[in-house]
Image: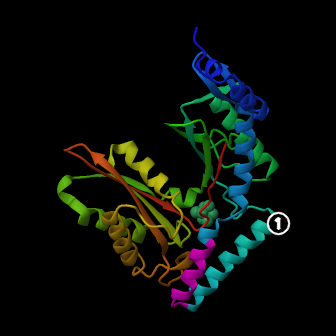
């Protein structure tokens, strides 16, 4: 048996082990030092993130409201944007939900491949975090059986997207998703000949048809390429990018800007009562697709653009 790290540098290995927190420590394994994380810590973090995300709107969203107020031509639109900002301030200060619809708990886990999870089942640990977060934070439980509509009672199950990444850290992102905006989202399999113009047509028409239903001003997440289900996931993930940040792909950045400009000519405005601020941003993620396909997903996000993350 070979214990590389211990043999090489036993003093530093011991120091590392001593410094470790009780629920996240390093242990010596056959392959050297491996970081162990007890899933109880993940439960605690998910609980806190559920409460934080539902009560504390990100600074990037507040800044986008401010910018929109400067650009908005409709006096009623400006008043609504002011009210949205006031609502967010009250929610933050009084630790109450930004919106009565506290959403489906969508949880993204970036799991470092050098992490060894101990103490139980990761999925169950996340569900328990959601249960506690929605209970302790007095957040509405919105999840039900599709046929009977019977409420599950604790806002579980959560939707969990796990990605294995290099390293020994775990990034947890909780993004509660409201029903009104999710209902307006769509996946379509375009044909390759539809091209970029086909994307623009579909997205703009989707926003026009959605009208006031997704509680504008919205953020439009677009996923292009992959497969049917991957396009939807890309669209959802694109919403996690901070508002005001640029797309790293210049072609997509241009497309985002062109689509946003067209959307804001639709006149839907804040809460659908008219104005130019229909959407605050358009975000695109793209990946290669099959030669016969051209998948496109549009995930519409409302002004309650909630997500919080932690790295452990
Ligand atoms: S769409 Fe968003 S803002 Fe509208 S009710 Fe649902 S969560 Fe609230």
Circle 1 residue: 94
Q: Position of residue 154 (x, y in %)?
A: 73, 42
Q: Magenta segment, principal secondary structure?
A: helix
Ligand 1 sits in quadrant:
bottom right
> In terms of depth relative to the viewer, which is nearer, 246 or 179?
246
Query: Where does the magenta region start and end?
Result: 62-74
Disc 1 secondary structure class: helix
The residue lying at 57 percent from left, 41 percent from top is: 109
The N terminus lies in which quarter of the figure?
top right
Q: Position of residue 257 (x, y in %)?
A: 38, 73
Which residue is at the far left?
A: 193
As displayed, is residue 122 above or below residue 6? Answer: below
The residue lying at 66 percent from left, 75 percent from top is: 84
> In terms of depth relative to the viewer, which is nearer, 85 or 249?
249
**Residue 8 part of the magenta segment:** no
The C terminus lies in which quarter of the figure?
top right
What is the crowding at mark 1: few (fewer than 14 residues within 10 Å), some, or many (at least 20)?
few
Which residue is at the far top?
A: 1
Q: Position of residue 203 (x, y in %)?
A: 36, 65
**Residue 71 part of the magenta segment:** yes
Colour basis: rainbow
As displayed, is residue 136 above or below residue 283? Answer: above
The residue lying at 80 percent from left, 62 percent from top is: 95
Q: Quadrant of residue 79?
A: bottom right
Tell me if residue 153 can be seen.
no
Q: Quadrant of residue 28?
A: top right
- On whether ligand 1 comes within 8 Å of the CB at mark 1, the answer is no
Tell me if residue 19 can be seen.
yes
The residue lying at 62 percent from left, 56 percent from top is: 307
Q: Position of residue 61 (x, y in %)?
A: 60, 70
> In terms of depth relative to the viewer, which is nearer, 122 or 253?
253
């Amino acid at each position: 048996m070979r214990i590389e790290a211990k043999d090489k540098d036993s003093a530093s290995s011991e120091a590392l082990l001593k410094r470790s927190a009780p629920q996240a420590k390093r242990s010596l394994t056959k392959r050297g030092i491996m970081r162990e994380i007890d899933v109880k810590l993940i439960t605690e973090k998910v609980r806190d993130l559920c409460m934080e995300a539902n009560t504390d709107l990100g600074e990037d969203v507040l800044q986008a409201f401010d910018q929109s107020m400067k650009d908005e031509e409709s006096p009623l639109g400006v008043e609504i944007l002011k009210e949205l900002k006031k609502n967010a301030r009250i929610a933050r200060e009084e630790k109450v939900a930004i919106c009565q619809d506290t959403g489906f708990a969508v949880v993204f886990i970036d799991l470092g491949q050098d992490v060894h999870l101990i103490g139980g089942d990761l999925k169950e640990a996340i569900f328990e975090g959601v249960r506690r977060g929605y209970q302790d934070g007095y957040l509405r439980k919105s999840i039900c059986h599709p046929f009977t509509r019977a409420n599950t009672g604790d806002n579980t199950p959560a939707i969990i997207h796990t990605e294995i990444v290099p390293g020994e850290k775990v990034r947890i992102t909780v993004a509660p998703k409201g029903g009104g905006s999710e209902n307006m989202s769509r996946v379509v399999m375009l044909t390759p000949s539809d091209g970029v113009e086909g994307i623009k047509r579909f997205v703009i028409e989707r926003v026009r048809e959605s009208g006031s239903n997704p509680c504008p001003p919205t953020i439009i997440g677009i996923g292009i390429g992959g497969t049917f289900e991957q396009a939807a996931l890309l669209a959802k993930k694109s919403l996690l990018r901070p508002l005001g940040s640029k797309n790293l792909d210049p072609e997509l950045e241009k497309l985002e800007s062109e689509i946003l400009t067209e959307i804001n000519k639709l006149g839907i405005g804040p809460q659908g009562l008219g104005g130019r601020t229909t959407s605050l941003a358009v975000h695109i993620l793209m990946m290669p697709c099959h030669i016969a396909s051209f998948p496109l997903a549009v995930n519409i996000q409302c002004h309650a653009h909630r997500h919080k993350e932690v790295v452990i």
